[in-house]
Structure formats: C-alpha cells, structure tokens
Image: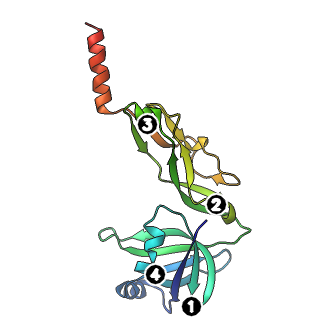
Amino acid sequence: MKTILLKGEKRAEVGTRSSKEIRRKGQVPCVMYSEGKEGTHFAIYQADFKKLVYTQNAYKVKLDIEGEMHDAVLQDIQFHPVSEMIIHADFLSVFDDKPVVMEVPINVVGNSPGVRAGGNLVKKINRLKLKGLLKDMPDYVDVEISKLEIGQSAKVRDINVDNIEIMDAPANAIVSVKTTRALMQAAAAEAKEDNK
C-alpha cells in the first residue's frame, strides 16, 4: 500500500471557537485516535488533503505532528454541506501487528459480453470495506466482469482477497449489467413482429 506524508501542527485549544479560527487560516481540525490513548488534536492545511482525499487510491498516512511520526489511516472526513470544503478529519493510528478496517477502491477488470451486446455497466459500490493487517491491504480490489451477461451482477461474495476479511454484506452487488431502454424497445418491436 502506498504511503502519503502529511504535516500537522498541534492544537493548543479544542472547541468550536478554536476550530473556526483554524479553518479561517486554511487548515482542517483533525484528531488521531489510538487504542487506549486520548485523541491527539492537530491541524493540517486544507490543500495538503488533495492527494489523500480526491483520489481513487487508498493510502497509509505518515503523520508528522511537529516532529512526532505516526502511522495512520484516514478514518472519517466531514465536508461543509454547501462549499464542500473539508471541515474535520479523523485518523486512526495503525500498527503492523493489529488489524485495521479500511475502505479500498474497486477496479473493474475485463470485457463484459452483456456490455458488448448493448447493456450498461452500472457500478453500485465504489469502495469495499476491508479488515486485515496493513501489510496485506491492497491498493485496490479487482472485480472481474468478463462473464457478466445482461441482468447479471458481480457480488461481494464473488471477491476474494488473500488474508483480508471483506466487511460488506456478501449479497451486495458491486457492478451490474443492466438492459438499456433501446434494447427493451428493440425486444418489444421484435416480439410484436413475431406475433403478427
């Protein structure tokens, strides 16, 4: 898994007033949680989140909080409902010997006969929730579609990732091949011709 470095500044104060002041400076209030410890409060510049958040990739984060280094993953992020600016981020401290839960993007692989026949490929899930050791965590999960006909789906239960537990419900469809309106109209016209 790829690693991205983020530099943070410790926060002297926490609370609404302090968070507003941090946001005015172009920073995002953040908290890093670690098992058995109180959360560490810090701030990261808004622009530094670009490579971590606005990407298809999943990253391990190397947090440099005023010289203290921590391995972490982005656990949760909140956006402003109107401006869509990041207003808060939660990180989870990770260790080589403890499992972590992460959302990892899916990568569609193959050429579906259903799509070649005129169907539409519909992505239902963009990311899968995985649990495992960080060393086993993939950058993305491949979803094979080369056997999907119109009306068929690739489901979570069809996916296997070595040494990783998939947390999503097994019956959830990841991608489906749907019939198009044009195909339905053509089939109806053909049926009408056959009945004459």
Relative vertical location of residue 40 with respect to residue 107 in this rendering, above or below: below
Quarter placement of the C terminus: top left
Earlier in the chain: of badge 2 and badge 3, it is: 2
**Contact (CB < 8 A) between labels 2 and 4?**
no
Q: Nearer the viewer, residue 118 or 158?
A: 118
The CA span between labels 1 and 2 is: 28 Å
At horizontal 69% and vertical 72% (from top left) the residue drawn is 95
Q: Pinpoint residue 94: horizontal percent, then vertical percent.
A: 65, 72
Dividing the picture into quadrants, the one containing residue 184 is: top left
Q: What element carries label 3?
A: strand
| Mark identifier at residue 51 | none
Q: Categorize mark 3 by other alpha carbons within 10 Å: few (<14), some (14-19), many (20+).
A: many
User: Which residue does the numbered mark 3 point to in the structure image?
Assistant: 177
Earlier in the chain: of badge 3 and badge 1, it is: 1
Q: Which of 181 and 142 is in front in this view?
A: 142
User: In the figure, is residue 160 to the left or right of 87?
Assistant: right
At horizontal 50% and vertical 68% (from top left) the residue drawn is 76
Residue type indicated by callout 2? Met
Which of pointers 3 and 4 indicates the residue nearer the eye? 3
The CA span between labels 2 and 4 is: 27 Å
Quarter placement of the N terminus: bottom right
Colour option used: rainbow
| Mark identifier at residue 137 | 2
Q: How many marks?
A: 4
Which of pointers 4 and 1 indicates the residue nearer the eye? 1
Q: Categorize mark 1 by other alpha carbons within 10 Å: few (<14), some (14-19), many (20+).
A: few
Residue farthest toward the right in the current orientation of the protein = 97
Q: What element carries label 2?
A: loop
Q: Categorize mark 4 by other alpha carbons within 10 Å: few (<14), some (14-19), many (20+).
A: many
| Mark identifier at residue 29 | 4
Please say whether residue 148 is visible from this viewpoint: yes
Q: Which of 193 and 11 is in front in this view?
A: 193
